[in-house]
Image: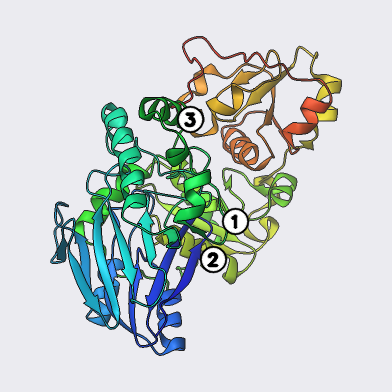
Amino acid sequence: MNLTVDVVETSELGDRSYIAHDGQSAIVVDPQRDLDRVERVLADLGLKCEAVLETHIHNDYVTGGLELSRRTGARYVVAAADHVEFDRHPAHDGDEFQVGGMRIRVIATPGHTDTHLSYRVDDGTGPAALFTGGSLLYGSVGRTDLVDTARTEELTHAQYRSAHRLVELSADSDAIYPTHGFGSFCSSGSATGGSGSTIGLERIRNDALTEDDEDKFVERLIAGLTAFPSYYAHMGARNRQGPGPADLSPVRPVEPAELRSRIEAGEWVVDLRHRTAYSAAHIAGSIGIELGQQFATYLGWLIPWGTPLTLVGESAEQIADAQRQLVRIGIDRPDGSAVGTPDSLAGPDEIRAYPRKTFDQLDAVRNDTHVAVLDVRRDDERAGGSIPGSTHIPMHSLLTRLDELPDGQLWVHCASGFRASIAASLLDRLGRDVVLVDDDYSRAVELGLTTATPHLPVGHPTRAAS
């Protein structure tokens, strides 16, 4: 018998779920809420799910663990110290139990959360599989400021010690399977992606293991923490309550007249098309967030929680893709959907557009007194350089800092164009004259438009941890 681990990747959130099995019995670790992907693997391999393991109460997504345990009859393993509103198999440090030919050992690894657990799974015939959640990642560890910012230093010390404890309890050949670290905002430091790693490899590359001075590690990790999505505030409570099943049935279609009334009522009508198409023509009052890897993250970060949401796309498939991403972060059912082009969904007088430009074109007009440059990158990005005279408001703070915007035509930029396109659509919705700088920031550097000395609005100093 050989222990096998299958990966179910959720690249949109930078997370992975895992299915460990012996050919017959399976353990599922940290499943996302859209369970059809996990169920497909189980069915294709003819596996029976015997246990569902949660490494921690997640902050970045709504778990599918409870629902999977209900559907399969599997035991649902959650830290005994977590205060939850559902029945579970309470896990304590040092607990061991058997699933098929696999032995699971519970290891307390506080840091990412107070009650974080890791699981060492082996079948006695080879290297173990170490499921580390938000503790030991590839190259670094999970962030430590999500529980309580006042406790960040305390939890960072705990995270360092947990990483070292995992190494002490494992063999160099043991494979590591983290939940975070593939673009997730739950990761920190120099966490990387990659297809796999081992304890031996992490010994020589992981910043929590190569730094001998715990205090220096804590100082460096905290200094590197950046802003994280505001919707995280809602995930922990939802996961403690016990989420129900995801509803991925088609969203109710909305006619053009109702679409207009929703916009006029101040609801969010989100256009999923690429930013190129949106800037060229869009329904006045809509918001452009192109469907892609970061769609749900930034929609969830920006939308006032609980605001009615209508999705507008080019196809039913596009709507369904957006719906799947949103259900993972607790936006269970969009309030409506519309499929079509702007001119098929609104009258000619309801269509708006704004220009797309490059940094070369910005260079030609930046001394124009009627032009203002708005930088919507994060504080840590801004600290590395900026365009002199530009106004800096991170995109996730834009809607609460509108009074800081300068007069004139706003040329909006970020690092690549994606976030700037969202900001431009929000400002266009408010009636501002905007230009989207749809270009890579490296071009601004090449043109000599930037300086390494950031210029920030008074009262908003640069902070590595925001």
* Residue tagged 1: 291
**What quarter of the picture does the N terminus occupy?**
bottom left
Residue 298 in view here: no
The image quarter containing residue 103 is bottom left
**What quarter of the picture does the C terminus occupy?**
top left
* Residue tagged 3: 224
323 and 69: which is toward the camera = 69
Rendering coords of residue 264 (x, y %):
49, 44
Dot in front, 3 or 2 = 3
| Left or right of 311 on screen, residue 292 | right
Separation of marks 3 and 2 at Cα, in angstroms: 33 Å
Dot in front, 1 or 3 = 3
Q: Is residue 326 above or below residue 417?
A: below
Q: Amino acid at mark 1?
A: Leu
The image quarter containing residue 18 is bottom left
Q: Along the polypeptide, which appears first: circle 3 or circle 2?
A: 3
Separation of marks 1 and 3 at Cα, in angstroms: 29 Å
Rendering coords of residue 136 (x, y %):
40, 49
Q: Please, what secondary structure does the residue beneath circle 3 have?
A: loop
Are the two marked residues, 1 and 2, in contact with CB atoms closer than 8 angstroms? yes
* Residue tagged 2: 321
Rendering coords of residue 176 (x, y %):
44, 59
263 and 116: which is toward the camera = 116
Query: Residue at left 54%, top 66%?
Result: 321
Q: Amino acid at mark 2?
A: Asp
| Left or right of 148 on screen, residue 136 | right
Query: Residue at left 37%, top 86%?
Result: 47
Q: Amino acid at mark 3?
A: Gly
Toward the bottom, the furthest residue is 46
CA neighbours of label 3 inside 10 A, class few (<14), some (14 to 19), many (20+): some
Separation of marks 1 and 2 at Cα, in angstroms: 8 Å
